[in-house]
Image (cartoon, rainbow, N blue to C red):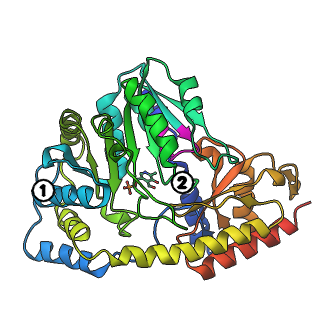
Amino acid sequence: MTNIVLSNLVAGIEPSPTEETSFLANTLKRQGVDVISFAQGEPDFDTPNYIKKAAIKAINEGFTKYTDVGGIIELKEAVVEKLKRQNNLEYDISGVIIGNGGKQLLYEAFATLCNPGDEVLIPTPCYVSYADQIRLTGARAVFVPTTEENEFVPCLEDVQKLWNPKVKVFVINSPCNPTGAVFPQEETRRIMDFLVENKTFVITDEVYEYLLYDGAKHISPAALDPKYKQWCIVVNSLSKTYAMTGWRIGYAAGPKEIINGMNSLQGHLTGNVNSIAQKAAAEALLGPQDDIARMVEEYAKRKDYMVNRINSIEGLSCIEPKGAFYVFANVKNLFGRTYNGNKLENDKDVANFFLKAAHVAVVPGIAFAYEGYVRFVFAKSLGTIKEGLDRIEKAIGELT
Ligand SMILES: Cc1ncc(COP(=O)(O)O)c(C=O)c1O
């Protein structure tokens, strides 16, 4: 038998933990187990009809060939218009690139900016893919831990403690996955002033910008002060806003040199994004935006229910997320309890216990570089959320 040895590059990557949890949940489902999954971060709504129609029109018109690597002009212009309208940011199309989801663009941005030995500062808890994407570039992810007491918002002093001349990039993800934190404007400004003074690029991952609750506001960090924009690479996506996770459309905007670099890389990795999805995306950005408010209103109700319910279950607690569609619940009070003779010692044990005893899938905090918590997704129907939490409450009641 061939002895297959993977490259050091690939052997060093951890599989995406959210996908791993979903995979386990799906395996159980295939075995006939009725699993409720709060693991996969995607809307349960269907893509709005006007967007689907644009895709069908593109197919019928034969718009099915390669396009420019960085996206069709029509979509880039729609992005430019959206950035102006929604974010008060002015770019021309040479400062915009269309990619296969925000995920690809994040990698391309890291790869365009970082050399081996460079460092990237990331507030934690953080999105699962940042650290491995950075590792692929040869740079090092350095975590800036936030605290639950401070609502998972990073502060300047913590950033300053870890900054050093090797730091090339800082990542801001607000609203944040997995905490739902929305970073306040004032602290963001203090951090941005420091970073810009120290010539550090900032990747602003804004994929949840529309999903805001209880009066929270999102302002793109690049728009807070004219001097910030040349240091920012704004990354965004249609996945969460328009319930388009499967269409794989994201966009980034930034200094032309950086966008050109990302474009060169993309040309050799994937080439253009699916031509049909690009047409649909242009329609999504320029068409009626009412579906977003409808979905956010529904998420808000689910968030209220989930937060109240989690805080009423013995052993669990959470703070109120201000954005995105996640609750990051503290499970430390379950540590030391026993399930089937096995002691729960960390968040991974708790997630496994939920899956085995309650048939409910959640993602352990360790996946987000932060221990002691698990992430619940509330982009599910109220009925599903209620049933899932009922099961968890019952299972916790049976712990010894
Ligand atoms: C914070 C964050 N950034 C980026 C992405 C990438 O999304 P997509 O590639 O679907 O645009 C996700 C998806 O879960 C996310 O949570």
Lower position in the chain sequence, tag 1 or tag 2: 2
> In percent of the image, x 87 and y 68: which residue is there?
397
- Residue 24 in the image, given as x and y percentages of width and height: 59, 59
> Is the C terminus in the top left, top right, bottom left or bottom right quadrant?
bottom right
As measured in the structure, the alpha-carbon distance from the residue carrying label 1 to the one carrying label 2 is 32 Å
Local packing at callout 1 (Cα closer than 10 Å; few below 14, some 14-19, many 20+) is: some
- Residue 137 in the image, given as x and y percentages of width and height: 37, 29
> In percent of the image, x 28 and y 81: which residue is there?
49
Q: Is mark 2 within 8 Å of ligand 1?
A: yes
Residue at the disc numbered 2: 18
311 part of magenta stretch: no
The foreground one among 15 and 372 is 372
Name above or below for residue 199 compared with residue 36: above
User: Residue 72 has which mark?
Assistant: 1
* Location of ligand 1 given as a quarter of the image: bottom left
> In percent of the image, x 33 and y 62: which residue is there?
238
127 part of magenta stretch: yes
Q: Amino acid at mark 1?
A: Ile
Q: Quadrant of residue 378?
A: bottom right
- Residue 152 in the image, given as x and y percentages of width and height: 61, 47
Considering the numbered disc 1 on the image, is that residue within a helix, a strand or a loop? Answer: loop
- Residue 130 in the image, given as x and y percentages of width and height: 46, 40
User: Residue 122 has which mark?
Assistant: none
Residue pushed farthest right? 400
> In percent of the image, x 66 and y 71: which residue is there?
306
Q: Over which residues does the magenta segment extend?
A: 123-132
